[in-house]
Amino acid sequence: MTEITTIKQRFGIIGTSELLDRALEVALRVAPTDLTVLVTGESGVGKEVFPQVIHTYSARKHNKYIAVNCAAIPEGTIDSELFGHEKGAFTGAVEARKGYFEEANGGTIFLDEVAELPLATQARLLRVLQSGEYIRVGSSKVQKTDVRVVAATNVQLQQAILEGRFREDLYYRLATVPIAVPALRERKRDIPLLFRKFAADVAVQYRMPSIVLDDSAREMLMNYYWRGNIRQLKNVAEQISAIEPVRTITADVLAKYLPEVHTKPMTMHTSTGSANDFANERELLYKLLFDMRSEIGDLKRMVTELMHRTGGAPMERASDIKALLPSVKPHYEEPFEEGFAETEEVEEEPRQRTKADVQREEIVRALRRNNGRRKDAAADLFISERTLYRKIKELGIEE
């Protein structure tokens, strides 16, 4: 545990969670080897720290460490960025250029959001992992490199494999040693510690008194779902520090900065072994379902009022219900009671909403909220910009 404490102090890692300590212990043990490591976890949990730990405690620590965000590089230039290109290989290639794998020779390369790589690039990456060989774009000469690869993703790669978006053989090459970084809601005791650290940093930077949480606010903070994990927690701490004039924060004040639909713990199944789509799409479903909660509550109250008016007698016509619900347009229809399901006026079953319908509506809403700015909409949905582009194309969304 002494080594784990040293790592936390060196890299500014805060927390006492057993899950966090286990992940750091695996990183420390695998660091002296050259085995490929796959770091998994939700967006915002701090996956980028683990490749740094692995590189620092490896024999390659005096050589280059290069971090590459695979989602931020356009598909048309990703091969050139990773493997380099020759002069004249494509329009604009006025001179030969080294790629990241050539630059990082002898060191470590961190491939963040590796699931966003195109399939053709995945095949090239697999060759590098298997034999250390690669070919520059526009060249026929095979070159060699000696690079330690650490990859990270917030996507369920097993699901991506089933959907044909990720190569299975590449997955097993990357996941020689898997490291799972826990979500913030799985480290409840660490949440107040992290919040205090972020608040103290703001106070020092802007020379103001640091905010503190009372017991009710601390309890609310620990029970919040934290879809954006540590990144979202830091954002909330900075907002409150800058805006609130009072330095002791109560639950009422804190609630203004936490979306109400997420103040209660989630009850939906989010296990990595579920058959749901990968994490980004699952978050879209959660967001829409919670948006629907208030409308469903309104429907229930109206039905209760209807039953009171009729003395508890069942209604004989669907029009009786419609008369009471003139302005309600629910996302989906569901019979209120078994007796309502079969009436003479119901001629056809409503179309069942699909997962694609849910995703399409949520993306359209995000684009509208951000005036069509895709980068801001992607941040609002907690997905990468490339994932948003792909979903817009797949779902046929017209902007």
Image (cartoon, helix red, strand yellow):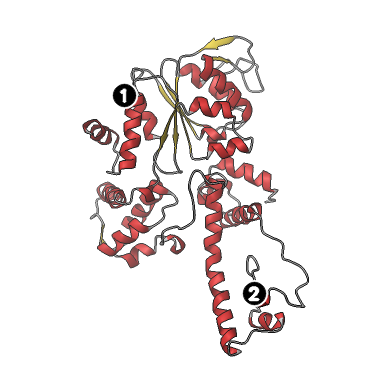
The tag earlier along the polypeptide, 2 or 1, is 1
Q: Nearer the viewer, residue 173 or 312?
A: 312
Q: Residue at x 27, y 36 (%)?
A: 8
Residue count near mark 1 (Cα–Cα under 10 Å), binned few <14, some 14–19, many ≥20: some
Residue 162: x and y in percent read: 61, 37
**Secondary structure under the numbered disc 1 in the rendered image:** loop
Residue at mark 2: 338
Q: Residue at x 64, y 74 (%)?
A: 338
Residue 141: x and y in percent read: 60, 9
Amino acid on which disc 2 is placed:
Glu
Q: Nearer the viewer, residue 92 or 108?
A: 108
Residue at mark 1: 57
Disc 2 to disc 1, C-alpha distance: 65 Å
* Residue 66 falls left or right of residue 201: right
Q: How many marks?
A: 2
Residue 52: x and y in percent read: 36, 29
Q: Nearer the viewer, mark 2 or mark 1?
A: 2
